[in-house]
Amino acid sequence: MNVLGDNIKKHRLRLNYSQEFVAEELGISQNAYSKIEANQTKNFTIERLEQLAALFETTVNDLLGIEKHITFNTTNDHNDSTGYIQ
């Protein structure tokens, strides 16, 4: 399942932006942008992700569908203060 295009579309619709508006902001054609939402583009860069995240006021991780959770072991089971990242 490709969530990137779906997440991008979700954020565009949340802000009530048209595909044409987003394409213009990115400096690409509406057709090229349409392919991004349809997960049909092969040349997707981190820079493009950063542009979209800024435009949609979100994070690259959110667009990618990545949830980062950090949990620290705060009990003193092992007489040390090590934690773990999940």
Image (tube, rainbow, N blue to C red):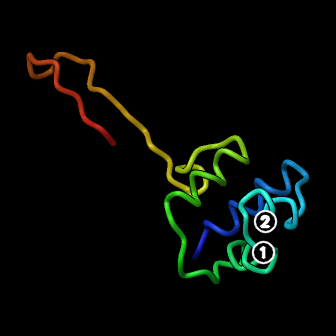
Label 1 Cα neighbours within 10 Å, binned few <14 / some 14-19 / many ≥20 = some
User: How far is mark 1 from mark 2, CA to CA?
Assistant: 6 Å
Picture quarter containing residue 85?
Answer: top left
* Residue plotted at (72% across, 78% down): 32
If the image is split into quadrants, where does the N terminus sit? bottom right
- In the rendered image, the vertical position of residue 59 relative to residue 78, given as above or below: below
Residue 29 circle label: 1
Q: Position of residue 53 (x, y in %)?
A: 64, 49
- Compared across the picture, whether 32 is left or right of 77 comes to right
The residue closer to the viewer here, 79 or 12, is 12
Disc with the residue nearer the chain's start (1 vs 2)? 2
- Compared across the picture, whether 57 is left or right of 74 comes to right
If the image is split into quadrants, where does the C terminus sit? top left
Residue 42 circle label: none
Label 2 Cα neighbours within 10 Å, binned few <14 / some 14-19 / many ≥20 = some
Looking at numbered disc 2 in the image, what kind of residue is underneath it? Answer: Ala
The residue closer to the viewer here, 78 or 51, is 51
Picture quarter containing residue 9?
Answer: bottom right
The residue closer to the viewer here, 40 or 82, is 40
Looking at numbered disc 1 in the image, what kind of residue is underneath it? Answer: Ser
Disc 2 designates what residue? 23
Q: The residue tagged with tag 2: helix, strand or loop? A: helix
Looking at the image, do the residues carrying marks 1 and 2 touch, with CB atoms under 8 Å apart? yes
